[in-house]
Amino acid sequence: MKTNKDALIAEFKTLLKKVKLDYQGKIPVYSVLRHVSQSGMQRTIAFYLIINNEPRLIDYYIENIADYKMNKRTEGLIVRGCGMDMGFSVVYNFSHCVFKDTKGIAEAGYVLNNHWL
């Protein structure tokens, strides 16, 4: 029996078939910084795929598959931490959650490639 996460992963993989690969041969995910807290320890970042030359928000998939939380005031996901590329961190973790069963452990996190807008 499929769980809700398994169904969402299958739906997301179907969506990925419409995405053009980037120059590295990976699936590009575009990150947009929406807000940074005053302390700098928390960010709100929105994530998009480009499908048929139009941006498609994928925060719902990341929220439910990789267990991030939505920011209720601004469009995007709450990402805690600092000192590294937090957009890359979210995309890597999400990629690992989606592809861990089909790719090797070392490769699963690098199927999706983060690009900042």
Image (tube, rainbow, N blue to C red):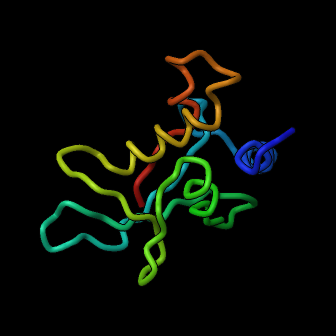
Residue 22 vs residue 87: left or right?
right
- Residue 42 visible from this viewpoint: yes
User: Farthest front residue?
Assistant: 1
Q: Residue 14: image x %, image y %? A: 81, 46
64 w.r.t. 1: above or below: below
Q: Residue 37: image x %, image y %? A: 21, 72
Say which residue appears at 65% left-offset and 65% top-offset.
Answer: 56
Say which residue appears at 47% left-offset and 39% top-offset.
Answer: 93
Marks counted in the figure total: 0
- Residue 17 visible from this viewpoint: no
Say which residue appears at 38% left-offset and 51% top-offset.
Answer: 87
Q: Residue 82: image x %, image y %? A: 20, 51
In the rendered image, the quadrant that contains the C terminus is bottom left
Q: Quadrant of residue 55?
A: bottom right
Viewer-side residue, 38 vs 17: 38
Q: Residue 88: image x %, image y %? A: 39, 44
Say which residue appears at 19% left-offset and 60% top-offset.
Answer: 41
Residue 114 vs residue 96: left or right?
left
Q: Quadrant of residue 105?
A: top right
72 w.r.t. 93: above or below: below
